Amino acid sequence: MSALHLSRIYPLPSDSFFLFGLRGVGKSTWARRQLPKARRFDLLDEGLFHHLLADPAAFGDELRELPIGSWVVVDEVQRLPQLVNEVHRAIEERRLRFALLGSSARKLMQAGTNLLAGRAVWKRMYPFTPSELGEQFDLERTLRYGAIPLVWFSARPAETLTSYAQLYLREEIKAEALVRNLPAFARFLPVAALFHGQALNISALARDAGAARATVAGYLDILEDTLVAERLPGFEGKLRVRERRLPKLYWTDPGMVRAIKKNLGPVSSEERGALFEGWIFTLLRTYREVSDLYDEIFYWSPTQARKTEVDFLLRKGSEFVAIEVKSSARHASAELRGLRAIAELEGVSRRVLLIPGRPGEGRRRTAEDIEIWPLDHFLEVLETGSLWQ
């Protein structure tokens, strides 16, 4: 079975939208299935790209020939930010609806592009979820090679991932001129990969990467803008102790972070925890996109208790759900320390320890009202939207 035969869980917005995601994540395939009759402009087509680069007005001329209310798909829109002005005009004058696909919003923002001032919602697409893969889903394979569609269906996933990492540097960074010093950025990437799932001290990262702090701060922005990684802020509530404010860094796909480290062998016990935790974070972000799962997400760790932490704290309205992630099937009482401590936070309605679990294993609850969820139950909760029930 190929990516063309798998249904994604992303609903089609009713009006114009931007859709950003990693290269190879399936944006174009999804758009073709959702909008089969739409007029398409694929800016990866070099002939079309150079034609519109030389004559951007030709784009507007074509739009004026379309029936009022038509859908238009522009793929890799970040390659020609100036087209967005014509998009704006077509929305206003002809009520056209646009699916604007891209692998990065950075060039659009750097160019000072008119980003449609609320006339187009911003959406993100992430790698495959277990529900999308169905019976094909395999946790070990996901942690080892990730779930980017381009890689998942490759007969040689290790080779494809290696090429994918090189493609990121060549096409996303070099071709779009996102950095002036490509070798320095290439040296930074494997160091940043070592910080996957860790609190991010930029000074320490800069020292390890052999680069200036300001340079590394800019590189981290690029990782986020190209959707390769994301920083998770620490919760800053008004508890009796002061909260740590350093963000944590998570790469979007476990295969990508392992490819950058040039380590694509079997997953070791040392890296399993961070890979599993990071993958859960990507799932949480995915379901935020498709079902409005939560309003905000943080991690929680008071500075006066360094070994006390909760991986994810989700807020919806005035209510919180705390989730601690462990990659081993068994857990010790000490691993519940953070979930015990966070009970003091006003509004916490659930405290969950998430573990991989075994087939058929059910959820259970401790005497302290902490819920133990195997992965299968967690995935069911995401699918049914019952996290807050």
Image (tube, rainbow, N blue to C red):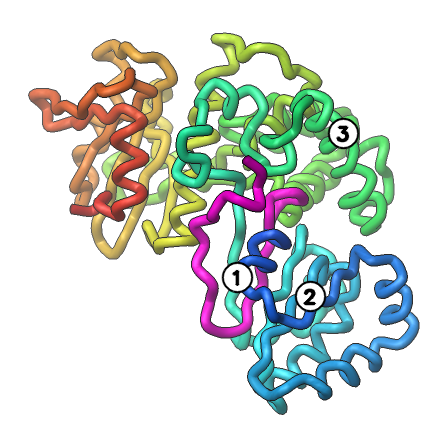
Residue at the spot of label 3: 163
Cα distance between the residues tagged 1 and 2: 14 Å
Query: Which of pointers 3 and 1 lies earlier in the amino acid sequence?
Result: 1
Q: Is residue 181 magenta?
A: no
Q: Type of residue at label 2?
A: Val
- Give the secondary structure at mark 1: helix
**Residue, x 21% and y 24% (percent of image)?**
372
Q: Nearer the viewer, residue 40 or 53?
A: 40
**Residue, x 22% and y 19% (percent of image)?**
361
Residue at the spot of label 1: 34
Crowd rating for badge 1 (residues with CA inside 10 Å; few <14, some 14–19, many 20+): few
Q: Is residue 16 magenta?
A: yes
Q: State the image coordinates of residue 56 (x, y, percent, origin top left).
A: 84, 76
Is any part of residue 49 visible from this angle? Answer: yes
CB-based contact (under 8 Å), mark 1 and mark 2: no
Q: Type of residue at label 1?
A: Gln
Q: The magenta stretch spans which residues?
A: 1-26
Residue at the spot of label 2: 74
Cα distance between the residues tagged 3 and 1: 29 Å
Cα distance between the residues tagged 2 and 3: 26 Å
Q: State the image coordinates of residue 315 (x, y, percent, origin top left).
A: 29, 48
- Give the secondary structure at mark 2: strand
Res 72 → quadrant? bottom right
Q: State the image coordinates of residue 101 (x, y, percent, origin top left).
A: 64, 59
Q: State the image coordinates of residue 252 (x, y, percent, origin top left).
A: 55, 36
- Give the secondary structure at mark 3: helix
Query: Which of pointers 1 and 2 lies earlier in the amino acid sequence?
Result: 1
**Residue, x 60% and y 75% (percent of image)?**
116
Query: Which of pointers 2 and 3 lies earlier in the amino acid sequence?
Result: 2
Majority secondary structure of the magenta segment?
A: loop
Q: Is residue 117 left or right of residue 305?
A: right
